[in-house]
Amino acid sequence: MDIPNIVRVPIDVRKGPWVPATRWRRNGDHPLDGVARCDPANFEGSVVARWRGVGAGAPCRCGAPFSDHGWIVKGDVMVCPGSYVLNHPDGTYSTMSEATVAALYRSGDGKKERRQ
């Protein structure tokens, strides 16, 4: 079963509230990043920015080099490629691993986001 790129998941896997979650793979993937207004060579998304941490060439626990990661501006959180970015009601963001979203979705606890 393929997991959609945009789903609804609970902020905490044990309880709600349910929030939109968008799969992130690289800068510009998030629908609110403002891709049309950016210089592709020097891109900074308004939701997910470029990784600024140390060890850009070293691998993360997810297996990807840190240079392939992003940084959530409103939440101060690193984003691994393939993770989902959760949009909280207060305007902040967090991440959830692809494996956790897949488990929620397959169990019926995750819901495909409907486009209005």
Image: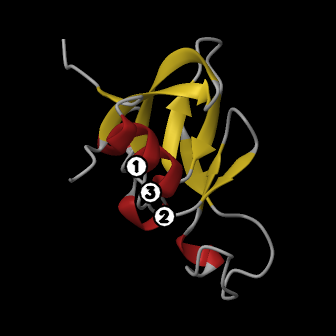
Residue drawn at x 41%, y 32% is 32
Which part of the image, by quadrant, shows the C terminus?
top left
* Tag shown at residue 23: none
Quick check: 60 left or right of 53? left
Residue type, numbered disc 3: Asn
Label 1: state its secondary structure.
helix
Question: Which residue is outermost to the front?
Answer: 107
Residue corresponding to mark 1: 102
* Residue 33: image location, x then y, percent: 43, 39
Colouring style: secondary structure
Instruction: Judge the density around disc 1: few (<14), some (14-19), many (≥20) Cα neighbours within 10 Å.
Output: some
Relative height, residue 32 to residue 18 (above, below): below
Per the image, the residue denoted by label 2 is: 81
Q: Residue 51, percent across and down?
A: 65, 63
Give 29 or 37, whichever is nearer the viewer: 29
* Residue at the spot of label 3: 27
Outermost residue, right side: 54
Task: Compare marks 2 and 1 and give the one earlier in the sequence.
Answer: 2
| CA–CA distance in space, label 2 to label 1 | 15 Å
